[in-house]
Image (cartoon, rainbow, N blue to C red):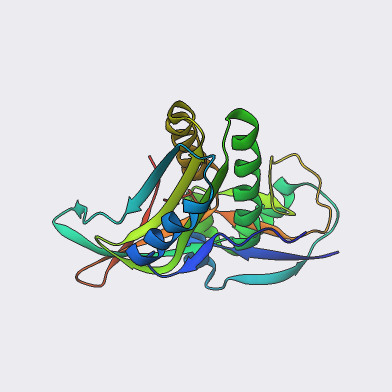
Amino acid sequence: MTIEINYFGMIAEVTGCNSERMSVSEGAISDLKGMLVGKYPALKNKDFRMAQNQELVSEDTLLTGQEIALLPPFAGG
Amino acid sequence: MNYKNVFIKGAISSEFIGNSIAKHQSKTNIGAHNIFLGQVRADKIEGKVVAAIEYSAYEEMANKNFHEIREATFEKFNLTCMHIYHSLGLVKTGEICLFVFVSSPRRKEVFKALEYVVEAIKADVPVFGKELFEDESHQWKVNS
């Protein structure tokens, strides 16, 4: 399946783009995270959480094909 | 589903805040308002001074989170109304980046409700802040 992945803040600085589409086989968030760290090794040292379909998810959550986001620490207010 | 948009481009002006207060004069069941204004601070970090914060957000998720915070706050406290506005883009030091406005028949509710809302915004909403220094370098803000 093809998944849209969105990057924000310092994570977008690492990836050099705000969004991209990636083809992934079925699996969990941890599998996608592994692929992304492979593509962007500097992510390994960054603090971020992942959201799927605009909900924060844990590493063992299964990929659904819905939109993914990599979210660095929040700084609202 | 489309949620109400909480974001305003740039700083939140005193005029906007004043108008928002004035609009409540017709709601005469209200006896107490409480307002939080977040202001961009000129932090000094390793000898460099913050000149502005450039805010960005995962807007769809953030508006959903603001909606959820709003619903939870109305559940917990006896409020008549509530408004939240957050800046996106550049906000200079001394300018307002967050405006939270809660109203109730009674004062005790608004004191508790306002703190609850502001803390929830800081913890739960995907907003990101790039602190721009006077020498044009930057670092990313993290809520403590």
**In the image, residue A77 above or below residue A60:** below
Which quadrant holds the N terminus of chain A? bottom right
**In the image, residue A51 above or below residue B144:** below
Q: Nearer the viewer, residue B71 or B125?
A: B71
Task: Please provide percent x and percent y for residue B18.
Answer: 37, 60
| Residue B135 located left or right of residue A59 | left
Q: Nearer the viewer, residue B66 or A34?
A: B66
Q: Residue at x 59, y 49 (%)?
A: B66
Task: Please provide percent x and percent y for residue B95.
Answer: 29, 62
Asked whether residue A75 is in view, the answer is no
Task: Please provide percent x and percent y for residue A40.
Answer: 56, 63
Q: Residue at x 52, y 72 (%)?
A: A16
Task: Please provide percent x and percent y for residue B29.
Answer: 54, 39
**In the image, residue B113 above or below residue B81:** above
| Residue B131 located left or right of residue A73 | left
| Residue B107 located left or right of residue B59 | left
